[in-house]
Amino acid sequence: MSSKFRQQTEYRDLLARLLSARRFGIKLGLDRMRELLDRLGSPDRQLGTVVHVGGTNGKGSTVAMIAKLAGNARVATYTSPHLSSLRERIVIDGAMISEAAIVAAAERVEEAGGGELTFFEQITAIAMIAIAEANVDVTVLEVGLGGRLDATNVVAAPIAVVTGVAMDHEAILGDSLEAIAAEKAGIWKPGQRAIIGASGEPAAVPFLVERAREAGVAELTVIGRAEIDRVPHVALPGEHQRANAATALAVLDQLQALGVVAAVDRAAALAAVHHPGRFEVIGDVILDGAHNPHGARALAETLRQRGERPVLVIAVSSDKDVRAIASVLAPVASAVIATRYQQDRAMDPAALAAVFREVAPGLAIETAPDLASALAIAPRPALIAGSLFIVGEARVLLAGAAADPMLVSDPSTRTT
């Protein structure tokens, strides 16, 4: 057996094990994670200076901007979910982790008894091992779900960010902005440098400020209009990305105050930042996740600013506020093709089309069984949105993005 074939086989076996771990669902809590990491030699304490990033929307874009701005140091990022390859979640100095490195880290997790932990707990432990071994200066760690009880919250981060709070995952995090803000702000700890971004609902900011003070943070920065207005040109389109950039710049200020990152050309960094699947243009197709109402509003506003009204190819997870998403996106679409991504969370295209017909009765609406079929009948320009899962499929089809040999994704249901 060649070494390349063996490596591919081992990586596929890892994906299969992680796919099986989805049966554990979502278990919020830190005890299992802390015990596992202690058995592994505490790799979470070997990540360099950690920036912990939570929030409802804008986390991924903010992480990408922080990594670009801090690029004169050695930087690792851990994000979720991935678009088409699990390896996207762990990036070191701008490069996805190799199959060999992720398999080696996973073997250590398995040997330490991590095989009984949830999917997200396992991949988080894998990431911490791999990043610790890379000896980086900065790790930008994205919260998976919520914050207070998220597996990433075992890490002692000197800088912590909540990009903003909006309604999403209500069944798990709570049915009010205040309840969700409390979960998001749970990443703040005594003595931290905390930053509140402007990428959520303004009504949530007072809750976040209150929680920061209760946590005993050493320094609190709240991003407002003045900070956003000072942001130079950002490669990622939309006013919401300028808000994310203002947050990333505040993080850079803190990293420089800690002596971790040297002076950098901020304008050049933001002008060069790239984040796949967030208003990403591939030929005559736009890709944007827009997987909740707040994200959909940001997408709709960006389209209006650019004077664009494309055909909307949409797939949505069945546990989302589909009516709210449809109400926001229908007015900026010239027509709609309702489809689905190839996982069990996807809403049936006929049911999705029915929602659009209710909220926009005069709009031309069709259905397609899958993305390839939808693209075959979609006039251009087209917009693919509604879920990062459909965006991931689109990047494989349209851009030849790296794709895993089997689909693996985070579970959507909580277990006790």
Image (spheres, rainbow, N blue to C red):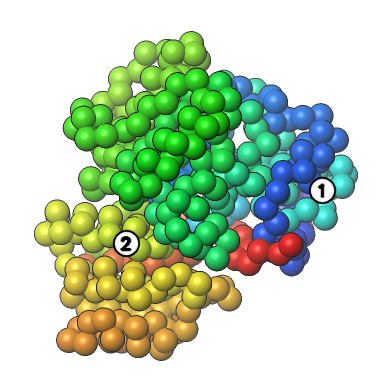
User: Disc 1 to disc 2, how far (Cα)?
Assistant: 37 Å
Towards the viewer: 194 or 269: 194
Mark 2: secondary structure: helix
Q: Is residue 171 found left or right of 121 in the rendered image? A: left
> How far across and down, in percent of the image, does residue 97 sit?
61, 41
Q: Is residue 324 found left or right of 111 in the rendered image? A: left
Residue at position x 56%, y 37% from top?
187
- Which residue matches tag 2? 296
Residue at position x 70%, y 26% from top?
45
Above or below residue 119? Residue 337 is below
- Dot 1 amino acid type: Gly
* Res 94 seen here: no
Above or below residue 387? Residue 85 is above
Towards the viewer: 350 or 3: 350
The disc at residue 94 is none
Q: Which quadrant of the rendered structure holds the C terminus?
A: bottom right
Mark 1: secondary structure: helix
> How far across and down, in percent of the image, does residue 128 sit?
68, 36
Towards the viewer: 272 or 144: 144
Above or below residue 354? Residue 168 is above
Residue at position x 42%, y 86% from top?
351
In the figure, residue 400 lies in which quadrant? bottom left
In the figure, residue 313 lies in which quadrant? bottom left
Residue at position x 55%, y 73% from top?
345
> How far across and down, in percent of the image, does residue 116 sit?
82, 55
- Which residue matches tag 1? 114
Above or below residue 396? Residue 197 is above
Report crowding for label 2: few under 14, some 14 to 19, many 20 or more residues within 10 A (C-alpha). many
Of label 1 and label 2, which has the lower sequence position?
A: 1
Q: Is residue 243 found left or right of 362 in the rendered image? A: right
